[in-house]
Amino acid sequence: MTWTPRTFLTSSCSLHPRNCAAKADRHPTLAASGSQQRRHGMSMTGTGQTESRDLREEEMDSAETLEDIEPSHYSVLFTYAVGVSLVAAAVCLLLWNEHRAGALSKALDQALEQVVHIEENDATPTNSTRLIHVTGHLSSHQEATDEAYNVSVAAVKLRRLVEMYQWVERSTYRQYADSDGIAMEQDFAYELDWRSELVDSTPFTRVSCVNPTEFPVKSKDFVLSEVQLGQLQLSDGLISMIDNFQPLDAVSSGEKAGKNFIYMTGSGGTPEKPQVGDVRISFFVAGILGPHGDKVSIVSECDGRHLRPFKSTAGVLVELLEFGDVTARVMFKQAYADNGLSTFLFRSIAWFISFMGFSLLSPVLHVPSDTLPWLRLLVPAESSPMEFSVYAWLVVVLFGWALARPLHAMSALLACIIPFITTRRLHHEA
C-alpha cells in the first residue's frame, strides 16, 4: 500500500497553499492530475481503513476464541487429572487391601495350626506362652456403674442412651407435567420423633419447628477395666468385642420412670404425651457376669495370667471372641469368612473408583495403544471404560496375590485370561 502521493500533495499544499493554487491556475492538467491523485489517495485510505478494521475484528475474534478455548482446555486437563487421581487411588486401595487380606489369611493359618483347647477349670496362670481356645463364663470383682443415676449392674459394659423428642424434617420429590415439560417439586414434611443425636432445626423451612440446641444429659458407656475368664485376665481388645447389648429395666430415680427408661421433662410432658425437648434415658448392658451370665469362647495367647493377641511372623495380630460354646475350628471359619467379606467390599469400592477414573479418561484411552501397538495384544483399542477397569482390577489383584499367595495368583491369572480371550474374540468378530 502506497501513501506517498497523498502525503506528498497534502504536505506540499499545506506548506505552500498559495503556490499550489497558482500552479493549479497555470497548469490545469496538473490540477486535474492532483485531483485524481487525491481521489485515488482517499480511495486507498478507505481501503486501508477497511482492511485495518477487518484485521482488528479478526484479532478480536481470535482473542475471543482463545478466551473460549483456554477455559475448556483447563477443564479438560482438570478432568484428566481427576481421572488419573481416581485410578491411582483405586490401585493403591487394591494393593493395600490385597496385602492386608493375604497377611491376615496367613496369620489365621498359623494360629489355627498352633491353637490348643483347654477347659474353663484349666484357665489358670502358666509359666509358658501358648495360643489357647477356652469357653466359659465371665467374672469380675467390679460392677459397671452410672453414679449419676445410681445404676449398677454386674456386667462388662453399661450403656446410658439419651434420646430427645425433636422435630425431624423429611423431604420427598415428585414429578409433574407443565407447559415446559416435566418438572420436579420437593415437598417437606415435619414430624416429632425420639432421636439420640441432636437435630439442627436452623435450616428447616418451617420456622415454627424449633429444637433445643443441646442435650441436658449425654449418652455414655461405662466399661470395666478388669474382666476374667477363670483366672485369666482378658485383654482390652477382647473386652471391646463384647457388644451383645440388651435392655436393662430402669431403676427408680427422682425423675418419672417408664417401663424401661427414665423420663425427664421441662414442659409438663408425659411418656404418653411427650413435648419437644423432653428426654428419656434408657440403659443397656453387655457381657453379663457370673455363672448364669453370658458364656463366651475365646482364642487368644495366654502369657502368665493375661490373655493377649497372638502375633504372627508377619506381625499380624489375631484375637477372636464369640458368644456361646463355639469350637476353635468354627471360630476360625468365621474369621476367614469375615476376612473374605471385607476383602470383597474393598475390592468393589476400588473397582468402582477405577471405573469412574477410566470414564473420565475415556477420550484418551486409545492413545497408549496407538503409541505402543504391542499394547493392543493385551487391551484392544476399542475397549470401554468398563473393560479397562476390569482389566486393571484383575491385574492389580493378581499382583497383590502374587506377593502374598502364589497359588491364588495362578487362579487369578486364569480368571484374567478367560475374559481377555472372550473380549478379543468379540472384537475380532465385530
Image: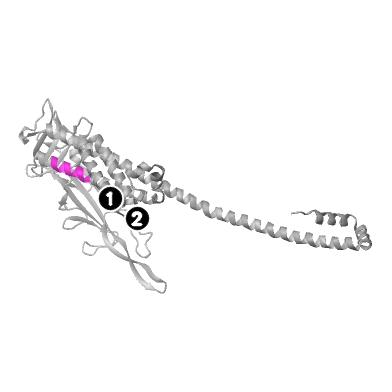
Which residue is found at the position 42% from the left and 72% from the top? 180
**Residue at mark 2:** 213
Q: Earlier in the sequence, mark 2 or mark 1?
A: 2
Whether the residues at callouts 2 and 1 have beta carbons within 8 Å, the answer is: no
Q: Quadrant of the N terminus?
A: bottom right
Secondary structure of the residue carrying numbered label 2 = loop
Q: Which mark is residue 425?
A: 1
Work out whether residue 71 or residue 256 is closer to the camera in this orientation and state it: 71
Work out whether residue 393 or residue 179 is closer to the camera in this orientation and state it: 393
Which residue is found at the position 87% from the left and 55% from the top? 12
The segment highlighted magenta reads 332-342
User: Relative to 106, is 60 on the left or the right?
Assistant: right
Work out whether residue 284 or residue 421 is closer to the camera in this orientation and state it: 421
Cα separation, mark 2 vs mark 1, equals: 65 Å
The answer to whether 368 is drawn above or below residue 270 in the figure is above
Which label sits in the foreground, 2 or 1? Answer: 1
